[in-house]
Image (cartoon, rainbow, N blue to C red):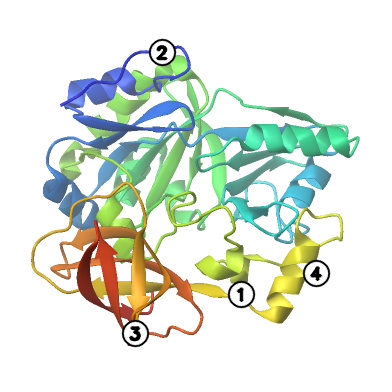
Amino acid sequence: MFSITPSSRLRPSPYYEATLAEGVCAMTTYNLMLMPTSYGHPEEEYWRLINGVSMWDVAVQRQVQLQGPDAGRLAQMLAARDLSKCKIGQGKYVPLCNHSGVLLNDPILLKRSEECYWLSIADSNIWFWAEAIARERGLDVAVSEPDVSPLAVQGPKAEAVVAAIFGEWVRDLKYFWFRETAIDGIPVIVARSGWSKQGGFELYLMDGSKGTALWNIVKEAGQPYDIGPGNPNWCERVESGLVAYGGDTDGRTNPFEVRMGKYVDLHVPDDTIGIQALRRISAEGPTRHQLGVVLEGTEPARADFKWSDIEMDGKKIGDLTNCTWSFRMAKNIGFALVSVAARPGDKVVVRRRTVPIQGTLCELPFL
């Protein structure tokens, strides 16, 4: 075992003390913060998400706030998705790309007002990117990181728990829509969203001093539904085909390669960053695509720190970008970022730690 050395560069979340009390036993770093990854019972935590309700500290999902008269213009310059019809109280999944069309992040954009947008980001310094673009374009907009820390409530019973806290109106929220409210004087945004396919909500805490209080409110409301702590579940997200920016992407991945083409609107204004390159890639077609791969063997795979080569007919055709034991399929599965010449049904060899393992490519999601 090893410990993480405290550092002022590594921030704890507002829910840190609450997760310690729950028995968190493993964390990772994400956006210069600590994120819980296990409470010691991975299979129990998995089935809790699949069948019941789980609560997650995802304060690492930081917000990049765009505020000012040109906030909407900046949001559209950053996002390769048409935001012209986005309404106040609506969120959208958006690809952010560089000038070459390479994916930089895949946040949820939340439109709080005509002059205030949030980008709820994956792991990367989008704050700096947005600030640089705003200054380079001479826009009247302030870019900042507000005091906002999401707490996720996920699983088929999540709606009942959140409705018990805030009221029946939450049942009418559409996917990615949100509403500002408060509970016991704690300001939050309630959004129907979350990094799982099991359904749920994210509670955007807007006062970091109230983390333990909000955690306990959710925990108490969830007791009739056997709520328990969890985390963005690796197994469920792979089974469900959810992309992890930075894990399933590299320094040249474009949105079309990782099944995000439907979120790219080629008709957005010409000053949208990367749109010229994305139009060209769309016309020519990407050289890689993302498929699933089912590996042979009955022993659960260990986690790895790097991608593994995928070969077909003795030649490398791409990489295995993640791998996990699927509790529902009772197989090792993962994502393959491979040449477009490879198709579902093809037999491949995956070299994990140089050991060759037979596998079969398939469509995503697995379940």
What amino acid is at disc 2?
Ser
Q: CA distance from mark 1 to mark 2?
A: 42 Å
- Residue at horizontal 76 percent and vertical 72 percent from the top: 280
Q: Residue furthest left?
A: 298
Q: CA distance from mark 1 to mark 3?
A: 22 Å
The earlier-in-sequence mark between 1 and 4 is 4
Q: In the drawing, does residue 236 fall left or right of residue 135? A: left
What amino acid is at disc 1?
Pro
Residue for badge 1: 286
Callout 2: SS:
loop
> How far across and down, in percent of the image, does residue 35 sit?
35, 32
> How far across and down, in percent of the image, does residue 12 sit?
39, 20
Q: CA distance from mark 3 to mark 4?
A: 40 Å
Which mark's residue is nearer the viewer, 2 or 4?
A: 2
The earlier-in-sequence mark between 2 and 4 is 2
Q: Nearer the viewer, residue 107 or 249?
A: 249
Residue for badge 2: 7
Residue for badge 3: 313
What amino acid is at disc 3?
Asp
